Amino acid sequence: MTTRVQSRPFTQINALASGGTFSYDLSEGLGYSSSAANFYNQADAFTIANVYQSDNTGKSDQLDTELNFVGSYYSEYVNQIRFGVRYSQRDSEVSEPFFGMLNFSASPLLSDFDIGVNEGFYFTNIPALASTLLNGQYLLDSNFDPADTQFASGLKIGSDDSNRLAESSVGEDTTAFYVEGDFVYRNIDINAGVRYVKTDVTAEGAANVDGVVNGVSERNSYHYFLPAINIKYHFTDDLFLRGAYSKALSRPSLAALAPRETFNFTTLEGSRGNPSLDPFRVDQYDIGVEWYFHEQGLIALTYFNKDFSSLVGSERVFLSREVSNETGTSMEEVEFTQPFNTGEGSVDGYELTLQSSLYFLGEEFENFGFTVNYTDLDSEAELTTQNSTQAQPFPNLSPSSYNASLYYDNGVFDAKLSYAWRDGFLQDGLDPEDNFPFQEDYGQLDMTMNYNITSAISLQMQVSNLTDEALEYSSSVVDALSSSIDTERRVLVGVRYKY
């Protein structure tokens, strides 16, 4: 059983500037520096608008239990039969205690309070920040009595209350039964089986109905039969024909299922989960030929096809929520983004693989070799938002991509130079504004080297993005570059010891 607990406390103070100045210098590219606001020396220039404090806490548990049985028959047609049962449980709890927002109707200046400053230790060698930034927790601890400070939301700083709309508890129980076997008929090898999967989801949280917050509990269940078969036909000892068919599914994350919501009090935008999400499912098959023409030589060509259903998209919902800010408390329409099951999709294409040592050039080249892999595919997905349903390429798949490597390995020293290329592709589907974010074409050159000093100690070096390429992203709305990320060249040098 695996348990994870995470806590992220923070305090935020929003201030309105009536005097101080800010400046940013972007002339040198992506790097920047800032003349950070000096709250300590310019306290008369800032008016406190509100104070917000919370401690986001998350806990997750996962339990997996599996029992398998194996029977060996060694008959003419049946080699082995296997069957078993597997039970898994996932639980997630999220809470936001010590939540609150205080509004100042008198609009006091920072100079009216003991504001304090952050210790320089926290910001050493970070040019965009300064030790004169306001310490929000210090302001709270020095000036407010949690027992007397009441918030428009009904919560107090430092209290044991919590933001119920940001709380959730999700449990997922999955039981699976399977049976499979290995069969042989003349020069045909067959592996076939079926798995039955049943999943029950229970999600608890809170809902705001006409300004009243009450607890909610939602349930969802689904079950599927998932068959699979793999067939291998031997033309010779080195030449094979392979075919496979299977059904599979991918469950949504517990975070996506959580009936909780968070939103920004200023922009009136937020996100919420959807306990009714079903897994997205796929029917897939492939057929290919493999020829092992040498001890280290392979040529393989494979055709594949995948049909998807219950894809997960993103939709907008507008809900009325109580909002507290510097102007007071009121009911406002908040725009939430939430996941939902949308349309279908399909992918089909082929993959070509070639790998070999350079033995054919002579004995002195037998430690050198290469690998090449090329994939070409067509894809289409029905992506649905609040506004429309549109056919687009399947997210995160490039129409074509390839990998090529050159290597040397004599058992003591080995080195590899690898280049990976992929065409531009649609990212995680369209957003609620019908904007299609694309990543542009990208290629990257990497290098690895390893030297074995002894059988236990080796020196290693890895260089990623040798040519210092940048990732570029564009938007379908304006058909122009929207962002560029320079990951830079990365070098890792180390010593490995095996014992």
Image (cartoon, rainbow, N blue to C red):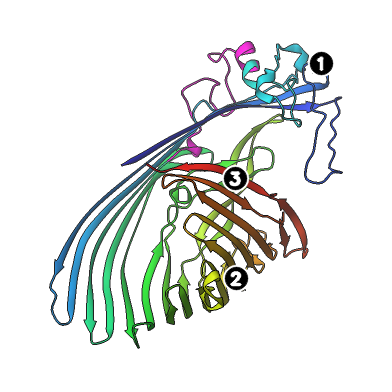
x, y percent for residue 388: 62, 68
Q: Is residue 488 magenta?
A: no
Say what amino acid the circle numbered 3 marks: Leu
Q: Main secondary structure of the magenta part?
A: loop
Say what amino acid the circle numbered 1 marks: Asn
User: Start and end of the magenta stretch?
Assistant: 139-168
Residue beneath disc 2: 402
Mark 3 element type: strand
Which is more N-terminal, label 2 or label 3?
2
Residue beneath disc 1: 41
Query: For the C terminus, which image quadrant?
Result: top left
x, y percent for residue 394: 57, 70
Which residue is at 36% across, 38% downward? Answer: 3
Mark in front: 3 vs 1 = 3
Q: Nearer the viewer, residue 228 or 210?
A: 228
The answer to whether residue 437 shows anywhere in this view is no
Q: Nearer the viewer, residue 314 or 451?
A: 451
Measure the alpha-carbon separation of dots 3 and 2.
25 Å
Q: Nearer the viewer, residue 429 or 108?
A: 429
Measure the alpha-carbon separation of dots 3 and 1.
44 Å
Mark 2 element type: strand
Say what amino acid the circle numbered 2 marks: Tyr
